[in-house]
Image: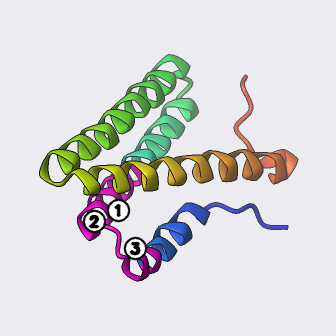
Amino acid sequence: MSPPKHVDLLVLAAAAVVFVLAGFSLLGYAAAAAAWLAQRAIQWLAQRRSGEALKAGNRQRAMGIIAATTLGRVWLMATVVLLAGIVERTAGLSAAILLAALFTISMGSSGLAYLLEPEGQSVQPR
């Protein structure tokens, strides 16, 4: 069985339909979508760089990259929610709810992907 890697992106696309049909703030959706896609790009880049650092044998650098980008991604999403809420109160609330749902789904799918990953494919500590 293939691990679910991009379920959060499918939920983000489905949320667009829900936002339009339910009449929720499209500014909130746009803000949450932009923040989510930006943080996913940062996550991809961080995983790539930390993988390179691990291959070079530099575990501290790999851990530092992951730690710094994780905190930065959270701050990015929080800032976007705050700014959307300043512009339009309902936009901030809808962005916060959507980002919380996406984060929960992303964490769950990452855990499931890890559990379903074949034994030899993960990076093993030396």
Q: Amino acid at mark 3?
A: Phe
Residue at 56% across, 31% down? 54
> For the residues marked 3 and 1, what is the alpha-carbon distance in whole angstroms?
12 Å
Camera-nearest residue between 56 and 104: 104
Q: What span is in magenta?
A: 17-41
Camera-nearest residue between 116 and 35: 35
> For the residues marked 1 and 2, what is the alpha-carbon distance in whole angstroms?
5 Å
Q: Which residue is mark 1?
A: 33
Query: In this rendering, is residue 50 above or below 60?
Result: below
Residue at 36% across, 56% down? 94
Dot 2 alpha-carbon crowd within 10 angstroms: few under 14, some 14 to 19, many 20 or more: some
Q: Do labels 2 and 3 touch, CB within 8 Å?
A: no
Q: Which residue is mark 2?
A: 30
Callout 1 secondary element: helix
Residue at 28% across, 45% down? 81
Residue 119 lies left or right of residue 11; in this view the side is right
Camera-nearest residue between 47 and 110: 110
Q: Which residue is mark 3?
A: 19
Q: Position of residue 47 (x, y in %)?
A: 50, 43
Q: Position of residue 117 (x, y in %)?
A: 80, 52
Instruction: Residue 86: give its label.
Output: none
Q: Amino acid at mark 1?
A: Ala
